[in-house]
Image: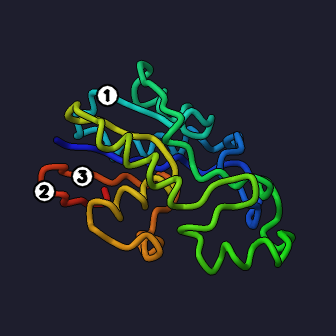
Amino acid sequence: MILYLIRHTTPDIEKGICYGQANIPLPDNFNDEVDFLLSKLKNHPIQHVISSPLLRCTQLANKINPNFSTDENLKEIDFGDWELMDWNKIPQEEIDPWMKDFVNVAVPNGESYMDLYLRTISVYQQIKNDYTAIVTHAGVIRSILAHITQTDLQDSFDFKIPYGTIVKIDTQTNQYQIL
């Protein structure tokens, strides 16, 4: 089975702001980014699209296939109390324990990376349709790549996933390539 993991395009938010499940709008150049992304997919027969329900993903999913579905488990990590805060203004006593063990330590009123991993892998393991695209977020994509490559979650940030990245996975062999 062939699966495509697609990270949403650039959101309209200042650099340095912590966001995960906040519903961030898209900038005016959204269609330019989408056109480029769609040109990369034109020779790939995507038949099914599942998206994170967040706006930055659903708008892209709609451009790929207007008959897409959504799954709450494909949302980015829940940053709880830190959503839409400047990373530099998060209290040191809150961020230090998380930075030391972000895999297992949950953000205040949010979740840990392990929480994201478990919900993401549950979706990944349920996909049965060939040529499915998942439109989602960097954390979700990294967790799936960590799963298929047996990479420790704390090392999964070695997978570079810029906005608009497309990862093609052969789920039989767990081989992947960035398109």
- Residue 133 is marked as none
How many neighbours does mark 2 have within 10 angstroms: few (below 14), some (14-19), or many (20 or more)? few
- Which residue in the structure is indicated by mark 2? 173
- Front-most of residues 80 and 35: 80
> Which residue is tagged 3?
169
Q: Secondary structure at mark 3?
A: strand
**Drawn side of residue 44 relative to residue 55, left or right:** left
Closest to the observer: 123 or 68? Answer: 123
* Residue pictured at 31% horizontal, 28% vertical: 48
* 119 with respect to 151 (left or right): right
Q: Earlier in the sequence, mark 2 or mark 1?
A: 1
Give neighbour class at mark 1: few <14, some 14-19, many 20+ (Cα, 10 Å): some
- Looking at the image, residue 102 sits to the left or right of residue 155; the answer is right
Coordinates of residue 119 in the picture (x, y in percent): 46, 46
Residue type (three-letter) at the residue carrying disc 3: Ile
Q: Is residue 115 above or below residue 45?
A: below
* N-terminal-most mark, 1 or 3: 1
